[in-house]
């Protein structure tokens, strides 16, 4: 951080003589008088910490005296204090013409560029344009270490911090931020195991601040000490909440500051095997409206990888993963400066996979170009596998097979991982198409499967599907299981013994079963299966008495494990212990959702809510004991539909001179229909007669209109 500069105007004797009069001949203040007044205001603004006013005064000085060194220094400092780093860098680059002043402000320019995210440019200026004394200063070394860290050169950053603590302990010893940065650099450099010793030498406790506790937890996570890492993350969470609350931050700001801790706690839970807790932690971190784009991206990426596209929140995580890059496949600028190279590579690769799962095939194909340009072989390997998956999505398996075959033949540039993945994918394609022989051939070249139980079981299953029993036996014999060889996996040995028993080799099967019973690596279920196999082998070889004795002993042992069942029928109806345990766990969870856990651990069912009788509210002045006459039951009907409606005659308009009437209108008067019944019709006839008597007949017909 740039320090505040002295703004007192230094004047020489010649300067003093030029403004001693105070005004020029025209009565206006002289230039020097104006400058002196502005610098006085500038000094007061700096002393009061009013950086906006200081910036305005510096601009006023530069209008009168362009290129003034002191005004430029003040302007640069004010812009840094106002966090207008882009304007600060532009001021030094465009407005400073003097080489000496430009060299003096090289550190401020490098700092401003660093805050703008231009790491390489800032590092170049700091190492080439600053003076030797400046480069050896404490602030320059701290800035260089930060730039090294942002550039991904974590080892060099850690070395600089260690040098600062060793040679300049007085300057950095009182700053807790430097210790936090040292811890972050050591963890990022892969030297997390050295952090505890470094803090001990510096007499710094990892509990001094929540940032230091968080970095120490990350170091423990790197070394595999997951339990202690979880404890330190909990400490960092609680300590951070208290610290930020003391700083008068609101709940949203506190959650924003602590979201990296929440995401890391979810990561620890995932590594401990607590998948549901981890997924809930990732979803909670994503739900926070955080300004930390890097943490949000990591949480979305981890959730998508954990639950997949069909898990809870997986689809949203996939969509957010797709927004990591622009349409050209380049990572967003907000993420580039805050993630390591390995993290950036994983995000770009997983974004392409998310596009594939979302059926954005064209965009996924465009992303392959970016993957192939990633440093290291991982990007090219993932690009090849994704391209094969795209061919399969497009129903072009022959192109996928050709691509994977060519990849295997080329050796993938001596990348064993690429060849392994290609062989596994090729075997899956052949097995899905029913070509089991080709799938077996593809798996034979995978060295990682040799001697493993999973590899042997897969090959045996493929041989059986292909109808090659001798091939399945050869796989089991080659796995070291035949004859109870030392080092054979129990599950492979049991499978080999079962096949030998099926093919009539009872003595060989019995020997393998007995070896599994004496194997310390076998669990209880595998030993019980081996004991049952021994009984079957004895029965098949003719030793009926021995088979019955082994079966009785096995029955007693299984009955004891099943809760004391004494007969075969009850034993068959008894569910396995694993099924019962799973059912009990599901029941406990469901009751936990419906009820509330008490102090003794029991789960109480929710109490039935009593229905309250609603009090009837009567109108004002109404007496329910003397309600009066009942209301009209037809009050809701329209008037014309009520039984009391008497009808309403239609109005007849009689046009003509006063006292005269139209014969047609008089005739219509008697023909008009009324809705009032026969009585009303009689009244209408009487009215017609009266009108005729007054009108004197049917009236006279007017002559036609003349021509217009």
Image (cartoon, helix red, strand yellow):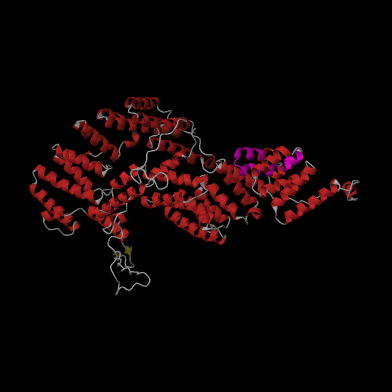
Chief SS of the magenta region: helix
The image quadrant of residue 643 is bottom left
Q: In the figure, is residue 697 to the left or right of 514? A: right
The image quadrant of residue 647 is bottom left
* Direction front: furthest residue: 696
* Direction bottom: furthest residue: 625
Residue 221 in percent (x, y) is at: 45, 50
Assess whether residue 202 is covered by the magenta stretch: no
Question: Residue at image x 42%, y 55%?
Answer: 227
- Does residue 332 appear in the picture of this structure? yes
Residue 219 in percent (x, y) is at: 49, 50
| Range of magenta residues | 99-125
Which of these two is toward me, 353 or 84? 84
Residue 416 in percent (x, y) is at: 40, 32
Residue 262 in percent (x, y) is at: 46, 53
Which of these two is toward me, 305 or 446? 305
Assess whether residue 108 is covered by the magenta stretch: yes
Q: In the figure, is residue 637 to the left or right of 376? A: left
- Does residue 479 appear in the picture of this structure? no
Numbered disc total: 0
């Amino acid at each position: 951080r740039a320090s505040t500069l002295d703004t007192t105007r230094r004047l020489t004797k010649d300067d003093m003589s030029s403004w001693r009069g105070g005004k020029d001949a025209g009565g206006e203040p002289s230039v020097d008088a104006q400058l002196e007044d502005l610098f006085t205001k500038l000094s007061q603004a700096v002393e009061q910490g009013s950086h906006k006013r200081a910036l305005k005064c510096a601009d006023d000085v530069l209008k009168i005296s362009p290129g003034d060194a002191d005004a430029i220094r003040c302007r640069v400092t004010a812009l840094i204090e106002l966090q207008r780093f882009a304007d600060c860098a532009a001021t030094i680059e465009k407005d400073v013409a003097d080489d000496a002043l430009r060299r003096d402000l090289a550190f401020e320019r490098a700092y401003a560029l660093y805050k703008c995210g231009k790491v390489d440019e800032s590092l170049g200026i700091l190492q080439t344009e600053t003076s030797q004394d400046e480069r050896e200063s404490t602030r320059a070394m701290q800035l260089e270490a930060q730039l090294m860290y942002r550039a991904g050169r974590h080892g060099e950053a850690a070395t600089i911090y260690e040098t600062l603590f060793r040679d300049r302990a007085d300057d950095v010893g009182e700053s807790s931020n430097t210790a936090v940065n040292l811890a972050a650099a050591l963890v990022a450099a892969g030297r997390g195991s050295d952090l505890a010793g470094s803090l001990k030498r510096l007499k710094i406790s990892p509990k001094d601040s929540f940032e230091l506790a968080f970095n120490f937890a990350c170091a423990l996570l790197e070394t595999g000490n997951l339990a202690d890492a979880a404890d330190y993350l909990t400490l960092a969470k609680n300590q951070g909440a208290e610290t930020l609350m003391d700083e008068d931050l609101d709940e949203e700001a506190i959650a924003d500051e602590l979201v990296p801790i929440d995401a890391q706690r979810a990561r620890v839970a995932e590594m401990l095997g607590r998948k549901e807790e981890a997924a809930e932690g990732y979803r909670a971190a994503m739900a926070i409206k955080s300004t930390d784009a890097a943490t949000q991206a990591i949480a979305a990426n981890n959730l998508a990888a954990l639950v997949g596209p069909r898990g809870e929140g997986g689809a949203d995580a996939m969509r957010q993963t797709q927004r990591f890059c622009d349409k050209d496949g380049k990572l967003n600028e907000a993420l580039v400066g805050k993630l390591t190279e390995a993290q950036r590579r994983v995000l770009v690769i997983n974004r392409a996979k998310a596009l594939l799962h979302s059926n954005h095939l064209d965009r996924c194909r465009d992303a392959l170009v970016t993957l192939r340009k990633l440093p290291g072989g991982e990007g090219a390997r993932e690009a090849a596998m994704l391209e094969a998956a795209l061919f399969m999505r497009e129903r072009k398996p022959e192109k996928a097979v050709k691509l994977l075959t060519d990849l295997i033949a080329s050796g993938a540039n001596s990348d064993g991982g690429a060849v392994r993945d290609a062989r596994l994918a090729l075997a899956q394609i052949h097995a899905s198409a029913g070509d089991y022989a080709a799938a077996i051939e593809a798996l034979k070249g995978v060295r990682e499967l040799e001697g493993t139980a999973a590899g042997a079981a897969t090959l045996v299953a493929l041989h059986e599907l292909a109808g090659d029993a001798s091939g399945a036996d050869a796989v089991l014999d080659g796995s070291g299981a035949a004859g109870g060889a030392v080092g054979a996996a129990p599950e492979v040995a049991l499978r080999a013994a079962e096949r030998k028993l099926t093919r009539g080799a009872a003595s060989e099967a019995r020997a393998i079963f007995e070896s599994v019973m004496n194997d310390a690596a076998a669990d209880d279920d595998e030993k019980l299966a081996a004991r049952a196999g021994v009984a079957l082998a004895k029965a098949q070889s003719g030793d009926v008495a021995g088979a019955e004795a082994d079966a009785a002993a096995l029955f007693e042992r299984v009955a004891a494990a099943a809760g004391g069942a004494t007969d075969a029928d009850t034993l068959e109806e008894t569910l396995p212990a694993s099924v019962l345990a799973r059912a009990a766990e599901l029941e406990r969870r469901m009751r936990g959702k419906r009820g509330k856990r008490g102090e003794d651990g029991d789960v109480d069912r929710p109490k039935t809510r009593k229905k309250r009788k609603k009090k009837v509210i009567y109108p004002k002045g109404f007496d329910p004991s003397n309600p009066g006459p009942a209301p009209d039951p037809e009050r809701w009907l329209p008037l014309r539909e009520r039984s009391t409606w008497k009808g309403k005659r239609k109005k007849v308009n009689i046009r003509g001179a006063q006292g005269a009437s139209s014969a047609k209108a008089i005739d219509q008067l008697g023909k008009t229909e009324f809705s009032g019944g026969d009585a009303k019709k009689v009244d209408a006839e009487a009215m017609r007669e009266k009108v005729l008597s007054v009108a004197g007949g049917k009236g006279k017909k007017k002559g036609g209109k003349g021509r217009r």
